[in-house]
Image: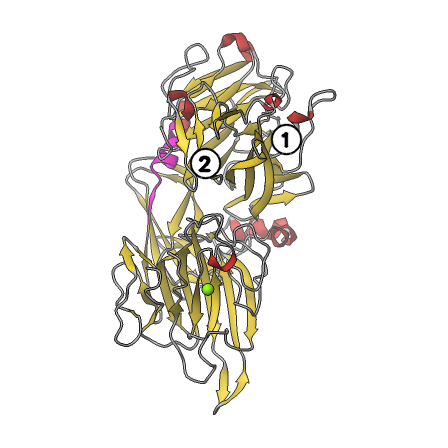
Amino acid sequence: MQKPVSTLIRLIPVFFLSCCLFSLQSVTYGESLGTITVEAGNYTRNDTPVSLDLSGVPEVFPGDDIRLVEVNGSRRLSVPVQFEAGSPPRLWWVLSGTTEPGTERKYELLKGDASAARGVSAVQDKKVLELQKDGTKVLSYNHAVVLPPAGQSELYNRSAFIHPLWSPSGSILTNIHPDDHYHHLGIWMPWTKTKFEGKAVDFWNLKAGQGTVRFNRFLSTTSGPVFGGFQAEHDHVALQTADGEKIVLKEVWDVRVYNIGGPGAGYWLWDIVSSQRCVADSPLLLEKYRYGGFGFRATADWKSETAAYLTSTGKTRKDGHATRARWCDAAGVSDGNWKGITFFSNPQNFRHPEAMRIWPGFEKEVFFNWAPVQTGDFEMKPGQDHLFRYRMYVHEGKVDVERTEQIWNDYAHPPKVEIATVASDGAIMLFGGADFSHWTAGEGKDIGWKLIGDTMKISPKSGSIMTKRDFADFKMHLEFKIPQTPPNVKGQGRGNSGVYIQRRYELQILDSYGQPPKYNECASLYKTRPPDKNVCRMPNRWQSYDIIFHAAKFDGSTKTDNARITVWHNGVLVHDDVALENKTGAGRPEGPEPGPILLQDHGNEVSFRNIWIVPL
Ligand code: MG
């Protein structure tokens, strides 16, 4: 499996890559883990990124080396893959070339080292994070504050936006601080007419001094053979509440550029998902307004006759504003040639197809905005998540409707991907959603936890539960969700649970979102070792642990070797083969006998799902 490490990728000479990637290879293939079928469905596919949901597929583990081979008759072609940790974990690759409607393609998933592939890199400095495809710049995300033109108010100081966005041939397609709107910032995403604690807050028109948006931190950056990207956290701040500045929304941008297209093919494809949560005590009311949300300000080169809009319903600059569409293309002439960008709204989006702000003729230049607020008020309640998903197709030339519809079909109706796994050596689904058959609350006690859909949830004070079976060495995957606790609940009271391995060593579960790594916070080996990084997600989001455990070794009753543990939290390695010198405080004493996996009831409604284990 290709690991997302950009430095490694940069070290591989190009000539080596070109031979190993684009030719048939004679390689020694490892043990088969399963057969994957991709069905095109009703649509023609062209270099389509696809992914496989790995929930309950113990054959693929974050630390494993795996490779994917396309099987076409007697031909076998190695295909670069990328593992995306998460809940669910996914495996990504590109359905390369053209796949006709109604056809399917077969792949085999194998153990063994994948060949290194060049792809999309995230390159960061003190000001920006740049996504590059094969060394060519695609877009630049500004995490440092960018100052407005000289003499303008410092209220315009702003971070957390994309600029420049480049065309595949290298033209800059975005603009910031244009004279007519100093607050326009390439690609950015604030709300305009809102009400918070009874007062108007405008996060868009910065000069009003009511609100702003700030970069807070990167949650991840990824370089890889299938996609590269970043996750960045933004604070939407009300500047003038009764208590001064207050963070109203926490937003996470998940931006990824796919390793398809490029200067030769004349296009890029990239996605953004913005998840927004009200983190204040009172809700944010978004009032009906003609703009607000995902915004794009085009380069000043695109003007009047050298600029055009086209929507999926056939509207243009003349009649497009305040209509709703699946996609909208904005294009213009830069460096002597037409180029453009198509914006796609995901069918799962709130109020899809969303209403749009398209500038009418008198504006001359080009601005585009997905504006779900245009069709009515809505409220963001504390603790609730709102997701806004968009795809961007950046292209040389004018809009090609047939190709655009093809991209739409990939986004809205992706190919069906399924795996038939070769039965792995003794994988046990400890919890797949159906029942507690692998679990016990202890002798003579009934399990008091709730079964809800594919999850189980702690009923506080009903007691911890543990596996009926004992384990020594194993690898294990589990997913958990921590509830939102009120702000007055502090420290160890916030969503506490834990995974007690062999009922001895606790891997802590806690709401540690935004905290520094500590020996009693989430993903710590409780009171023994903090995680190398704190990658804890917000409450109410699913998270994952992947664990490799080797039991302590004993000669009679004398310990000869410590237990050892490796843990990935949300796919990030946080304990790398760490020795456990002793049990956790409340754990059972160390000894030669194996033990169960215990899930701790610490009085909070923590949920679990998709738990499997492979004894080693
Ligand atoms: Mg605990």
Identity of the residue drawn at 56% across and 56% down: 534
Q: Is residue 356 magenta?
A: no
357 vs 115, nearest the viewer: 357
Side of 79 where 146 appears, left or right: right
Side of 206 where 500 appears, left or right: left
From the viewer's perspective, is residue 287 above or below residue 452? above
| Disc ID at residue 158 | 1
289 vs 383, nearest the viewer: 383
Picture coordinates of residue 93 (x, y %)? 44, 48
Picture coordinates of residue 350 (x, y %)? 37, 31
Picture coordinates of residue 74 (x, y %)? 37, 55
Q: Residues within 10 Å of mark 2 (few under 14, many from 20)?
A: some
User: Can the viewer see residue 330 in this picture?
Assistant: yes
Residue linked to disc 2: 282
Identity of the residue drawn at 62% across and 26% down: 172
Q: Which residues are magenta?
A: 405-417
